[in-house]
Image (cartoon, rainbow, N blue to C red):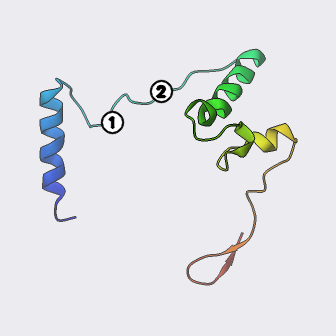
Amino acid sequence: MKNFGLFISFFRYFNKKYKRVGHLFQDRFKSEVVEEDNYVLSLARYIHQNPVKAGIVKKAAAYGWSSYNCYLNNIGVNLTHEYKNTRGRQTA
């Protein structure tokens, strides 16, 4: 990457301007242990309703990138389907 120095300069500028340290996306994501069934259900509801609240779709079932319909209809998602990779070999 020949413009990598430009990125480094931007990261330094950004950190100095906002009084931050470390890499640009440090501490952005976190995780928590979910132990209660009711909390799991409320999290699933929250996640599946995000496209509706954002105004992308009117109903969660209409959002194509969601697993909402699989949960609603108790359908498993097959993640082991066969496809042809870019070199033409069959893979699983």
Residue under label 2: 30
Task: Tell me the amino acid under the disc marked 2.
Answer: Lys
| Quarter occupied by residue 60 | top right
- What is the spatial separation of the Cα atoms under label 2 and label 1, in whole angstroms? 12 Å
Q: Could you tell me if the residues under marks 2 and 1 are in contact, i.e. CB atoms within 8 Å?
A: no
On the image, the x and y values in percent for residue 89 come to 64, 82
Residue under label 1: 25
The crowding category of the residue bearing disc 1, from other C-alpha atoms within 10 Å (few below 14, some 14 to 19, many at least 20), is: few
On the image, the x and y values in percent for residue 24 come to 27, 37
Task: Residue at 71% x, 37% y: name it.
Answer: 59
Count up the numbered dots. 2
Task: Please tell me whether residue 83 is drawn above or below residue 8 in the rendered image.
Answer: below
- Image quarter where the N terminus lies is bottom left
Q: Nearer the viewer, residue 5 or 41?
A: 41
Helix, strand, or loop for circle 2?
loop
Helix, strand, or loop for circle 1?
loop
Mark with earlier residue (2, 1)? 1
Task: Residue at 64% x, 41% y: name it.
Answer: 57
